[in-house]
Image (cartoon, rainbow, N blue to C red):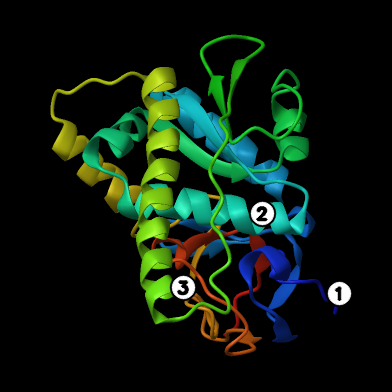
């Protein structure tokens, strides 16, 4: 088995003590996704292609949540998208009602949409009604969390308050990106946001799994066998504890 650091242990404040067999190599080597509640082991490029076709057939644009090549960046990106989807307000999530969503690396996206752009932006919006498909990169600078190690009680309480502010800023920045790119229609906003939560929060977007960790053990939702992570190795901000897991998972049984 090819062992790797779990999404950047330094950034996450976590350390891997053991990998079970069900976690294979990074996403690019064959990620799993959720389709109608069932995992798919289709190659990443096939997942992007399928998502593009679904968007095209529905007359929608395709929104790609970009998976960075670097493991540490994957962890950070997964946390940011998790914060948005789990804690975003109706106005932040409702724009997603009108697009098909998939998670993919830029390398895999470019196999389907060669003009997807350069670098590794947060997201890429692909218009599926044109040939060749037109793509717009969506990017912003997200504030980073500070380490919570070695704090006394008073400092720890302040750290938690600071993390709440940072989480709100990160969610707000992502919400602003979506509203600017997809529009900010206030009609039926609550209903549209509820539909997004049912589609992307109860089940993960294609190309990812939902996972959760509070700094001692990590659970990948829908997977019976889970990895063992060293306890007491670090702190995970409250709103980052459920995140999009961008590594491949092999379903047992």
Mark identifier at residue 2 = 1
Q: Position of residue 169 (x, y in %)?
A: 41, 42
Q: Which residue is mark 2?
A: 74
Is label 2 in contact with label 3 (beta carbons under 8 Å)?
Answer: no
Mark 2 vs mark 3, CA separation in Å: 18 Å
Q: Position of residue 119 (x, y in %)?
A: 75, 30
Q: Is residue 18 visible?
A: no
Sequence order check: which comes first, mark 2 or mark 3?
2
Q: Which residue is mark 3?
A: 221
The residue at 58%/35% (across/down) is 141
Mark 1 vs mark 2, CA separation in Å: 18 Å
Position of the C terminus, as image quadrant, is bottom right
Q: Is residue 193 left or right of residue 122?
A: left
Position of the N terminus, as image quadrant, is bottom right
The residue at 74%/39% (across/down) is 108
Q: Nearer the viewer, mark 2 or mark 3?
A: 2
Mark 3 vs mark 1, CA separation in Å: 22 Å
């Amino acid at each position: 088995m090819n062992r790797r650091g779990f999404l950047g242990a330094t950034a996450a404040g976590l350390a891997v003590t053991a990998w079970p067999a069900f976690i294979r190599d990074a996403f690019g080597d064959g990620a799993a996704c959720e389709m109608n509640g069932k995992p798919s082991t289709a190659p990443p490029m096939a997942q992007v292609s399928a998502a593009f076709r679904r968007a095209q057939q529905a007359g929608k644009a395709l929104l790609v949540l970009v998976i960075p090549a670097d493991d540490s960046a994957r962890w950070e990106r997964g946390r940011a998208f998790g914060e948005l989807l789990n804690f975003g307000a109706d106005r932040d999530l409702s724009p997603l009602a009108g697009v098909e969503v998939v998670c993919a690396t830029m390398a895999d996206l470019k196999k389907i949409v060669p003009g997807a752009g350069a670098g590794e932006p947060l997201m890429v919006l692909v218009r599926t009604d044109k040939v060749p498909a037109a793509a717009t990169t969506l990017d912003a600078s997200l504030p980073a969390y500070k380490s919570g190690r070695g704090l006394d009680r008073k400092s720890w309480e302040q750290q938690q308050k600071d993390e709440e502010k940072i989480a709100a800023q990160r969610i707000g920045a992502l919400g602003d990106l979506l509203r600017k790119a997809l529009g900010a229609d206030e009609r039926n906003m609550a209903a549209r946001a509820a539909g997004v939560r049912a589609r992307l929060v109860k089940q993960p977007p294609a190309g990812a799994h939902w996972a959760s960790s509070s700094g001692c053990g990590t659970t990948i939702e829908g997977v019976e066998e889970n990895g063992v992570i060293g306890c007491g190795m670090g702190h995970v901000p409250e709103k980052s504890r459920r995140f999009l897991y961008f590594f491949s998972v092999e379903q047992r049984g």
